[in-house]
């Protein structure tokens, strides 16, 4: 792309382009939704620091809907540079406005009404936060004074987890509902399965990566891990990224700034930890033959193998990916 731009790119008159764009916008018959979107894009372009932007509620609702539909597509659209959108951290703050904790949940209690005459609990449905927010947005665009009527719940849908070999029996999720659609049931069920199946292994992988990240040489790190007299340090990952980041073809092609310099939010993403502690990174680092990196390579390989062993035995993904580490356990020697 850089070569093509240098050879075939043409200079444009920024002032003329800006004036033309202003004339187009001035004469265009924009809908309320278009107007909000354009204004937000212009406003965002005026900030040198992205975190200073205060997004319009309509854009937040749209972003949450896109993010929940496909997180990878949302991030790719945001990274493309064509459209300015809120960061995943911003969306996280909006969708996690209250903490789940033991004791009385005052936020949940506020949404429940107790009818003394019959002893009934009368709540309001909360089938899908994003669907409700989009419905509010649609009504607002056509009638700013319009309101979405709350649909009264008639029953509670609960998910119960029961242990097979022990006495565990707990309700782990509940939703106030009226009529549940197949789509909502599908989303809730597989979200719960994902949480239950992956609650330990990802946490341990992130812990491994975070410990590795803090192992640095000199004053940069809080510790410096050693084995067989050789360092296991994050500096090797930083060096690999800096040397290879501008290469078109490289084995560790998934390494990005977010992997190498994680912030407080990206530190929580299992995907980023798995991509650093992967066989591709280990092979690329080994291929460089830099002195003193042998134990770092072994450490990454062991983390990769352990993660495969913990994630593969329950499925046939090993055969599909031709990865023996992901194959099912079939004997006591596996």
Image (cartoon, helix red, strand yellow):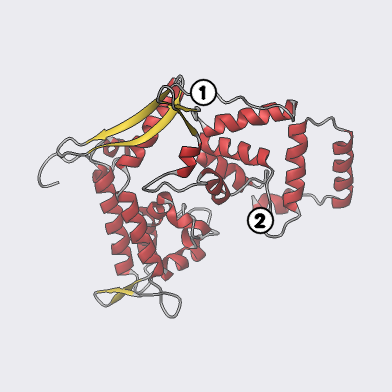
First in sequence: mark 1 or mark 2? 2
Disc on res. 152: 1
Does 49 sit left or right of 187 as displayed?
right
> Looking at the image, which residue is at 17% across and 35% down?
164
Outermost residue to the left:
332
Q: Nearer the viewer, residue 223 or 61?
A: 61
Q: Nearer the viewer, residue 170 or 232?
A: 170
Q: Quadrant of residue 219?
A: bottom left
Q: Is there CB contact under 8 Å for labels 1 and 2?
A: no
Residue 138 drawn at (x, y percent): 67, 27
Residue, disc 2 = 50
Outermost residue to the bottom:
218
Residue 320 seen in the current view: yes
Instruction: Please determine whether, in this image, residue 255 is positioned above or below residue 164.
Output: below
CA distance separating discs 1 and 2: 40 Å
Residue 251 seen in the current view: no
Local secondary structure at mark 1: loop
> Looking at the image, which residue is at 49% across and 55% down?
265
Residue 327 drawn at (x, y percent): 23, 40
Residue 268 drawn at (x, y percent): 43, 54
Circle 1 residues within 10 Å: few <14, some 14–19, many ≥20: some
């Amino acid at each position: 792309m850089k070569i093509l731009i240098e050879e075939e790119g043409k200079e444009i008159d920024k002032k003329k382009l800006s004036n033309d764009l202003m004339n187009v916008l001035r004469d265009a018959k924009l809908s309320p939704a278009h107007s909000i979107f354009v204004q937000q894009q212009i406003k965002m372009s005026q900030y040198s620091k992205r975190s200073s932007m205060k997004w319009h509620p309509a854009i937040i609702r749209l972003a949450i809907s896109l993010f929940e539909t496909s997180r990878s597509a949302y991030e790719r659209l945001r990274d493309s540079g064509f459209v300015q959108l809120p960061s995943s951290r911003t969306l996280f703050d909006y969708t996690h406005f209250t903490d789940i904790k033991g004791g009385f949940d005052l936020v949940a209690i506020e949404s429940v009404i107790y009818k003394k005459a019959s002893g009934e609990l009368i709540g309001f449905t909360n089938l899908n936060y994003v669907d409700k927010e989009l419905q509010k947005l649609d009504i607002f665009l056509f009638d700013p004074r319009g309101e979405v009527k709350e649909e009264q719940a008639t029953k509670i849908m609960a998910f119960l987890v029961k242990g097979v070999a022990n006495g565990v029996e707990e309700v782990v999720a509940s939703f106030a509902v009226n009529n549940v659609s197949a789509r909502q049931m599908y989303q809730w069920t597989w979200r719960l399965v994902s949480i239950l199946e992956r609650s330990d292994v990802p946490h341990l992988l992130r812990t491994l990566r975070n410990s590795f990240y803090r192992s640095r040489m000199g004053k940069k790190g809080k510790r410096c891990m050693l084995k067989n007299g050789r360092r296991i340090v994050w500096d090797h990952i930083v060096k690999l990224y800096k040397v290879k980041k501008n290469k078109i073809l490289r084995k560790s092609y998934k390494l990005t700034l977010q992997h190498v310099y994680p912030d407080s939010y990206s530190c929580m993403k299992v995907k980023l930890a798995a991509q650093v502690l992967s066989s591709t990174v280990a092979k690329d680092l080994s291929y460089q033959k830099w002195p003193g990196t042998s134990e770092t390579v072994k450490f990454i390989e062991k983390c990769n193998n352990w993660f495969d062993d913990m994630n593969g035995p329950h499925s046939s993904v090993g055969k599909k990916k031709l990865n023996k580490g992901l194959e099912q356990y079939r004997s006591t020697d596996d």
